[in-house]
Amino acid sequence: MKKVFKLQVENKKPERQLESIKNEVRKYLKRERKKKLPEEAVYWDFACRFGKDSDSAKSVSVSELTVALDGAHSEAWSECYVEIIAQASMKKAVEADEEDDESEA
């Protein structure tokens, strides 16, 4: 998802608009997590960026995304850019080696 959200909309209270944006982000994350993982993948990881526009967007974690939205609301931004890219995370080779060692013992 690469999207510019308007934080200031006519005929809507800014607090309700902010909650609407957060809800859309949560729904997107939930929908992506339900997708089938590729083989050997353990979980879905998300690369997120947030800023006033796509050029000034900085990397944030998924948990920091709602905090960043709150900050944009408190600073009275007119709009913000949110980018969320789903990536399948594979098991690390170290974890597999540790499991093999434990089963041999």
Image (cartoon, grey):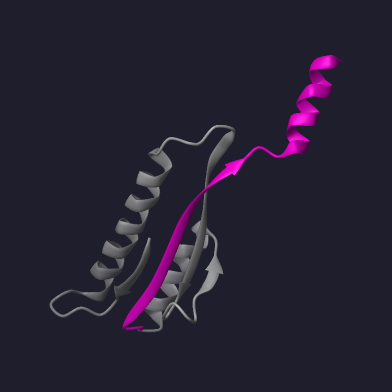
- Residue 38 in the magenta stretch? The answer is no
- Which residues, given as a range, are shown in magenta? 77-105
**Above-or-below relation of 56 to 1:** below
Find residue 45 and report its horizontal and vertical position in percent.
Answer: 53, 49
Q: Where the C terminus falls, by quadrant?
A: top right
Q: How many marks?
A: 0
Between residue 73 and residue 92, name the one nearer to us: 92
Relative placement, left or right, of 62 versus 69 is right
Relative placement, left or right, of 24 versus 59 is left
Relative placement, left or right, of 61 versus 25 is right
Quarter occupied by residue 33: top left
**Above-or-below relation of 85 to 49:** above
> Residue at horizontal 62%, vertical 40%?
90
Q: Residue furthest right?
A: 105
Find residue 25 and report its horizontal and vertical position in percent.
Answer: 36, 58
Q: Residue furthest front?
A: 39
> Residue at horizontal 31%, vertical 83%?
78
Find residue 21 and report its horizontal and vertical position in percent.
Answer: 30, 64
- Residue 78 in the magenta stretch? The answer is yes
Relative placement, left or right, of 63 versus 81 is right
> Residue at horizontal 54%, vertical 60%?
61
Q: Where the N terminus falls, by quadrant?
A: bottom left
> Residue at horizontal 46%, vertical 64%?
65
